Image (tube, rainbow, N blue to C red):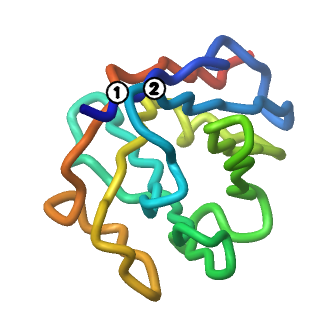
Amino acid sequence: QLQLVESGGGLVQPGGSLRLSCAASGNTLDYYAIAWFRRAPGKEREGVSCITSSGGSRNYVDSVKGRFTISRDNAKNTVYLQMNSLKPEDTAVYYCAADPRRRVPCSTWSLDYDYWGQGTQVTVSS
């Protein structure tokens, strides 16, 4: 059974950066597309970014394009989300999730994902 654990969240000032990590255990990440989702207080869960199992294709929601970068290191069984130029509206709990179906392109629809981490809080505030 695949298990995912997020880390790297915290409090950062507007304009700052954070790098989130999604570490897997119980299975190799090579077989899974991975996505990052977020849920802000009072809002629906939103797909932020995804990356295919090979890492060859990535997608981003418009609000983070040019600021966030998703990457993966299959040797370390870890996926990353580098977040730059953070804004207060990026404040949310961030979750990573895994899709075993190797969709190309990858999906940012939550129902396509079978395995979820517990989330990490990101707060952007001065």
Q: Give the residue at x 25% y 41%.
A: 115
Height in image: 66 above or below 83? Answer: below
Compared across the picture, whether 69 is left or right of 105 comes to right
Q: Residue 3's mark?
A: 1
In which quadrant is the C terminus drawn?
A: top right
Q: Quadrant of residue 68?
A: bottom right
Image-quadrant location for residue 96: top left
Q: Is 97 situated left or right of 51 in this image?
A: left
Residue under circle 2? 25
Image coordinates for residue 5, horizontal then vertical, percent: 46, 21
Kindly indicate whether the residue at mark 1 contacts the one at mark 2 (C-beta within 8 angstroms). yes
Report the front residue among 98 and 28: 28
Looking at the rendered structure, the secondary structure element under dot 1 is strand
Q: Earlier in the sequence, mark 2 or mark 1?
A: 1
Q: Residues within 10 Å of mark 2 (few under 14, many from 20)?
A: few
- Mark 2 vs mark 1, CA separation in Å: 5 Å
Q: Quadrant of residue 78?
A: top right
Locate the N terminus by quadrant. Answer: top left
Which element is circle 2 on? strand
Q: Is 78 placed above or below 111 here?
A: above
The residue type indicated by label 1 comes to: Gln
Frontmost residue, 114 versus 61: 114
Residue 20, x across and y down, in percent: 66, 31
Q: Position of residue 93 (x, y in %)?
A: 41, 27
Asked if residue 47 lies left or right of residue 120, the reply is left
x 51%, y 70%: residue: 61
Residue at point 24% right, 56% down? 113
Q: Amino acid at mark 2?
A: Ser
